[in-house]
Amino acid sequence: MYASVPDLLRLLAVPAFAYGAYRDIETRRVPDLLWPPLLVLGVLCLAVEGWNAVHAPDAFTFRAFALRTAVSVLLVGGLGAFFYVVPVGFGGADAKALVAISVLLPTYPTYYFDGFVLPHVPTTVRVFALTVLMNALVLGMAYPLYLLVSNAARGDIATVMAVGKRVPVERLPVEHGSLLEDREGTRLTGGLDLDALRMYCRWRGVTLADLRDDPGLRDPGTLPAEPNDPTDGVVMTSDGRARTDGGERDGRGAGDVVAGDGDPWGAAAFLDDIEGSAYGTSPASLREGLDVVTEREAVWITPGTPFFVTLCLGLIVAFTYGDLLFAALGALGLV
């Protein structure tokens, strides 16, 4: 294989994103330590390519390099920065990943093999970060079809079968996502976040099985006088350690809990005590979610498949096959 030094170095993004995707699947948390090395690597690659472009025999080479870099950083990186500041359904790791690829992958890499060249399908725009992003969006749109087919094959038929999966309630402590059910049945919008459910249980010092077995725990009078640290809701291993490389809540000790009689489950007391939001949970949504998971044997949840995973797949496809959207438009004769 032959390629320029910057293009060879950019291949390091593949194992880095693969590790991040693995951590995201397991914990829904991507280590922040991934980003500084990728950003530094990206700046170094840009410096080498910029130097070569400046000293190229024609002015077009530098103009093309500058334009593609600007589009990558301002469009893809700017989109990531926007979603980091305004996280409308976008995780912090997803936003940071977009910023990282905008700096690391602004120009199209080329890898020459004996008889063929990768990526197989380049684009006329040749902004590689944009190709990665578009591949991720195309692959992400295929996921609802997978859910629809797999749920139908299992006989799990519901209005939410294209956006969720049905799981036994006993598995909720190790699942990710949010409830797609309320007291009246299934719903297309997510309900109680499962990380918030884990936070609540740890705060009270009980398990979900305890809540299901003892209806008396619905009484706010049973709240502990000195609650535990709720953590950030990360899934724990069998030995009680967090399945993450960090990102725990701070170790603030919880104060005395005051719960009124009109606060079933002590939901308002919990949210008041942690002095913040548990993934957008309100007392009403927490109460309703607790009612659902303590009364039913199986529930529908969003699979919570993170965008970071599809971004990683989009990256791998971009390095190998190339631009999925451009290939599809070409097949239709539109480009």
Image (cartoon, rainbow, N blue to C red):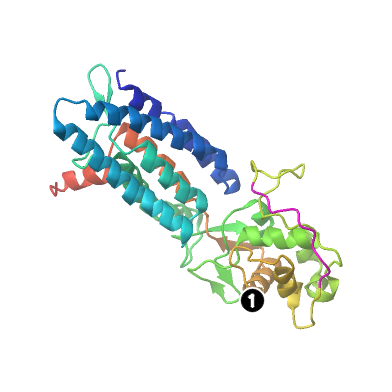
Counting from the top left corner in percent of width and height, residue 14 is at: 43, 33
Q: Amino acid at mark 1?
A: Ala
Quadrant for residue 244, please give it. top right
Count of numbered circles in the view: 1
Counting from the top left corner in percent of width and height, residue 13 is at: 43, 33
Counting from the top left corner in percent of width and height, residue 115 is at: 22, 18
Q: Residue at x 34, y 33 (%)?
A: 46
121 falls in the magenta region: no
Residue nearest the observer in this picture, 55 or 104:
55
Q: Secondary structure at mark 1?
A: helix
Residue nearest the observer in this picture, 40 or 181:
40
Asked if residue 121 lies left or right of residue 159, the reply is left
The residue sitting at the right extreme is 225
- Name above or below for residue 55 compared with residue 97: above
- Name above or below for residue 143 compared with residue 190: above
Residue range corresponding to the magenta coloring: 247-257
Quadrant for residue 219, please give it. bottom right
For disc 1, the marked residue is 284
Q: Residue at x 27, y 19 (%)?
A: 113
